[in-house]
Amino acid sequence: MAQFLDRVIAAKSPALITAYETRIQELEDQRLVLEEKISKCEAKLPDFDKTYKTAIKFLENPHKIWASERPEDKCTAIKLVFTEKLPYDKTEGYRTAPIALPFSVLGELEGGQYEMVRGEDQNTIPRYCYL
């Protein structure tokens, strides 16, 4: 809208000024409609910091959340460790579901040999590379 206002000030032609003013009014109406939709929106996203903090705390010590007395914590632990619901077999019991990416990566890193690798430019930030 600011660009159109600048153009209205610089314009000499009455027809051009009218066209810019019409477009400014359309944009203002659109802005008001969007603001109203946003204000009526009931779905609120969870707090990013709180969600992120929970996941990081879990990765630091998964057993701490699993050992909690709260059933919600146990459900959260299961959801963070596995990518699917735990499969259950009547004769063999629970089977292992696919493991979530953070735990897969941590499993691959365990026991590997790693060295610092620099790019061609020695000023680049060093990266770890699996050898």
Image (spheres, rainbow, N blue to C red):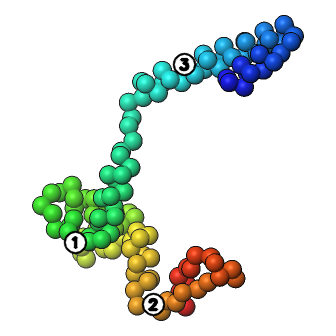
Quadrant occupied by the N terminus: top right
Mark number displayed over residue 32: 3
Reply above or below: 62 against 49: below
Which of the marked residues, 1 or 3, is nearer the chain's N terminus? 3
Q: Which residue is mark 1?
A: 63
Query: Where residue 119 sits in the image (x, y, percent)?
Result: 65, 81
Give the side of residue 19 with respect to residue 106, left or right: right
Please report the residue visible at 63 percent of the width from the left and 78 percent of the height from the top.
Answer: 123
Res. 50 visible in picture: yes
Q: Residues within 10 Å of mark 1 (few under 14, many from 20)?
A: few
Q: CA–CA distance between discs 1 and 2?
A: 24 Å
Q: CA–CA distance between discs 1 and 3?
A: 50 Å
Query: Where residue 85 sits in the image (x, y, percent)?
Result: 34, 62
Q: CA–CA distance between discs 3 and 2?
A: 58 Å
Please report the residue visible at 36 percent of the width from the left and 57 percent of the height from the top.
Answer: 52
State how many labels appear. 3
**Mark 2 belongs to which amino acid?**
Gly
**Mark 1 belongs to which amino acid?**
His
Q: Residues within 10 Å of mark 3 (few under 14, many from 20)?
A: few
Query: Where residue 91 sits in the image (x, y, percent)?
Result: 24, 75
Provide the secondary structure element on which disc 3 rests. helix
**Mark 3 belongs to which amino acid?**
Leu
Q: Which residue is mark 2?
A: 112
